[in-house]
Image (cartoon, rainbow, N blue to C red):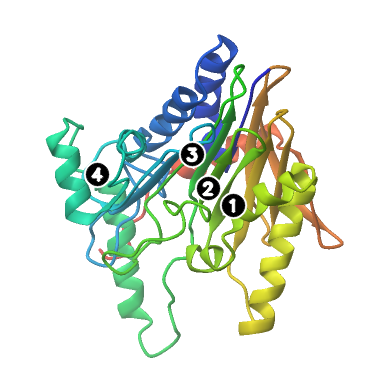
Amino acid sequence: MWAIIGTWRMALEGVKLASEILENGGDAGDGVETCIQYIEDFPYFKSVGYGGLPNENMEVELDSAYMDGTTFDFGACGAVKNVKNPISLARKLSTLDANNFLVGSGADAYARKNGFEIVNMLTDRAKIHYKNRIYEENKFKNKKELKPYLGHDTVGICALDSKNKIVAGTSTSGLFMKKAGRIGDSPVIGSGLYADSAVGAASATGLGEDLMKGCISYQIVVNMKNGMNPQDACQDAVKYLDDVLKKAKGKSGDLSVVAIDKYGNFGCATNIEGFSFVYASYNTPAQVYLTYNEAGITKYKLASQEWLDDYMNTRKAPLVKKYE
């Protein structure tokens, strides 16, 4: 028995690769790393890895984390630059007895010292997105408020292997036009991800500053430990945090989560429209699901081929330079 789930449509090809590993009795950690590496390397996914959108200084800063649910070992890195596969750096850090969470120049130095591939992660497409944004800010200055781009499509993967080991991993370039050095929930254990092989695992995507206020991934695993199935565990955690934030501040950021339990059952929940996820298991091929809200409860359905085609065509479409 094995299973794997990932946030957003962008996880599909990576989940398929991981499924081959898991189907052949491979390790959940290898599945998670292979899956996320593919997503990091694909230049048309503009919220993860190579091709990720830059910060306010047109620098790509990447966050990632990895957690083994059997040993509870974890590794995490934040605001790293030019490291080709942050997920691999995070997994390496999980093997250390200490210094498991490195950020900025320290993380970059560790990656270089330990032979990780160093490349320029800023693509020409990302530069166009950045310059278009600067153009829009100048054009609409004093006319309307342009807030930082809130697209925060972190890839979060949770996998169960045939030896009952559960692993979770995340990777993201964070908010577009974010402040230099900003780190969201993605690499924070308990917020962006959490894994316990005796229970299950969860991962989150959304506005990191709000997700961290609820330690939401840990809460989902606790919910499952207390007897909830993955779907109810996710729904309860999202609704509770969404309600708390709205009561305290009058608003809540985007909150979307996925989870699996130790039996391979899965769950998802969101407070937004348009959240998608990918799931595969020993008896279910990798498929994309679209969520929708029904009386305050997250439901999901299989994505149509038309939707899938439109998704990739949109990602690969030529960009128009607004600043010329």
Q: Is residue 286 visible?
A: no
Q: Which residue is mark 3?
A: 72
Please state which of residues 212 and 84 is positioned toward the viewer in this rendering.
212
Q: Residue at x 62, y 17 (%)?
A: 162
Amino acid type, label 3: Phe
Tell me the residue that label 2 is attached to: 193
Specify few, some or many for label 4: CA neighbours under 10 Å numbering under 14, 14-19, or 20 or more.
Answer: many
Mark 4–mark 1 Cα distance, whole angstroms, equals 29 Å
Between circles 4 and 2, the one closer to the viewer is 2
User: Who's the residue at 18% across and 51% down the image?
Assistant: 106
Contact between labelled residues 1 and 4, with CB atoms less than 8 Å apart:
no
Q: Which residue is mark 1?
A: 217
Secondary structure category for the residue under label 2 = strand
Q: Mark 3 vs mark 2: give the one in front.
A: 3
Earlier-in-chain disc, 4 versus 2: 4
In which quadrant is the C terminus drawn? bottom left
Give the label on residue 296, or none: none
Q: CA distance from mark 1 to mark 2?
A: 5 Å
Disc 3 and disc 2 in contact, CB within 8 angstroms: no
Dot 3 or dot 2, earlier in sequence: 3
Q: Amino acid at mark 2?
A: Leu
Residue 257, how many percent across, how many down?
63, 50
Question: Residue 181 falls in which quadrant of the image?
Answer: bottom left
Of badges 4 and 3, nearer the viewer stands: 3
What is the number of the mark on residue 121?
A: 4
Real-space Cα distance between discs 1 and 3? Answer: 14 Å
Amino acid at the residue labelled 4:
Met
- The answer to whether 29 appears left or right of 324 in the picture is right
How dense is the environment of label 1, judged by Cα within 10 Å: few (below 14), some, or many (20 and up)? many
Q: Quadrant of residue 133?
A: bottom left
